Amino acid sequence: MRIVCWKFIRNFVPTKVNLCIKKVAGDPICNRCYLFLEDVVHVLCECSYASQIWLALQIREPSNASSLSFQDWLYQMFNINGLQHIQTIIIAVYAIWHARNKLVFEGIAIRIEESIAFIRSYCLDLNLTQSRLSSEDIIGPSRWIAPLDLFLKLNVDAGFDPSTKTAYVGVIIRNKSGAIMGAMCARRERILSSFAAEACAMVQGLRFAMELGFADIIAEGDSLTVIKKLNSKSRDLFEISTYIGDAKSLARRFHTCRFVFTRREGNRSAHAMTLESRKYAEEMFWVEDAPGSVQSIANEDRRWLDPP
Ligand SMILES: [Zn+2]
């Protein structure tokens, strides 16, 4: 990402105006609006595609953009919008440039909403990766803890394949003696990030628990960010928020539902269920049962239980 920005700053990128100067291309007009010369500042600031993206991201642009060099424009963007938006601005510059290349070289028009979704999910992933790194020492149980009394424990996990945008969801429900009450696995397509996959897994888990008629649930996952968001009252604009919203409204339909963070060691059975989902094209459900590989991990979890 830094390399891309640096290239722009040096004005090395082959915009049509640059190519004309070098006598490569004959026509310096913008391929999108056909109104203006295509230089870097036009593509990234003036052209309506760019300005609609800045508007949607609530990033303000300098009023005199057209009279600025790219360098000065970028400097002013950082200045006007503040340090906390530098990351968004750089990712958006990259996305707008990528959309321009797709149009010019392949004739493919990337919709504005697609670019915005890309920018938001990229920013979110960066932020979450940073927060995950800094929260690695967080204190959470490092083994599976059985629920108390009438509660059932729902463990969820997700694997994510970014190349196919597929989430592999695993869910297991156990009672206070560690007996398996239900398990399910599923694939979900068109998932934008690993965090969306984790949030999606929680939604699937809650639906499954509800279908089995359970009333009091401890819902546990190993994505701290997702659990924090599920427990927070505030809403965010990013793409996992639909799953967070769905999970919160499902949770209200239980008699009791609490969201709890566990370390990965406490979530091994759910993780094993995500591996099962790679074997099946369809959703799979087990009632008072689970695949053999998962049963043996669940049995290991039970060894920690106090004798009745
Ligand atoms: Zn244009």
Image: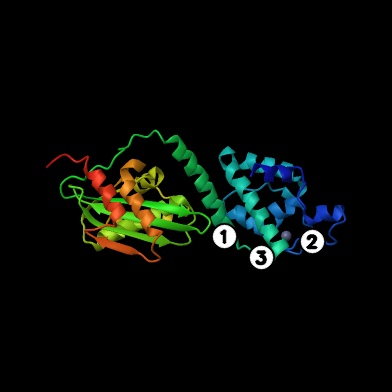
Pointer 1 and pointer 2: residues touching (CB < 8 Å)?
no
User: Which mark's residue is nearer the viewer, 3 or 1?
Assistant: 3
The CA span between labels 3 and 1 is: 13 Å
Q: What coloring was used for the rendering?
A: rainbow
Tell me residue 141's x, y (percent): 30, 38
Quadrant where the C terminus is found in the figure: top left
Tell me residue 183's x, y (percent): 28, 57
Give the amino acid type for the residue marked by disc 1 in the picture: Glu
Mark 2 beta carbon near ligand 1 (under 8 Å)? no
User: Which mark's residue is nearer the viewer, 1 or 2?
Assistant: 1
Quadrant of the rendered structure where residue 10 is?
top right
Q: Secondary structure at mark 1?
A: helix
Q: Quadrant of ligand 1?
A: bottom right
| Above or below 259: residue 114 | below
Image point (15%, 47%), residue name: 149
Work out whether mark 1 precedes mark 2 in sequence or the reverse, and give the earlier one.
2
Give the amino acid type for the residue marked by disc 3 in the picture: Ile
Give the amino acid type for the residue marked by disc 2 in the picture: Ile
Q: Nearer the viewer, residue 114 or 76?
A: 114
Q: Name the mark on residue 108.
A: 3
Q: Secondary structure at mark 2?
A: loop
Pointer 3 and pointer 1: residues touching (CB < 8 Å)?
no
Quadrant of the rendered structure where residue 116 is?
bottom right
Image point (42%, 61%), residue name: 188
Q: Nearer the viewer, residue 37 or 9?
A: 9
Work out whether mark 2 precedes mark 3 in sequence or the reverse, and give the earlier one.
2
The CA span between labels 1 and 2 is: 25 Å
Q: What residue is shown with label 1?
A: 114
Work out whether mark 3 precedes mark 1 in sequence or the reverse, and give the earlier one.
3
Image point (33%, 46%), residue name: 268
Tell me residue 168's x, y (percent): 41, 57
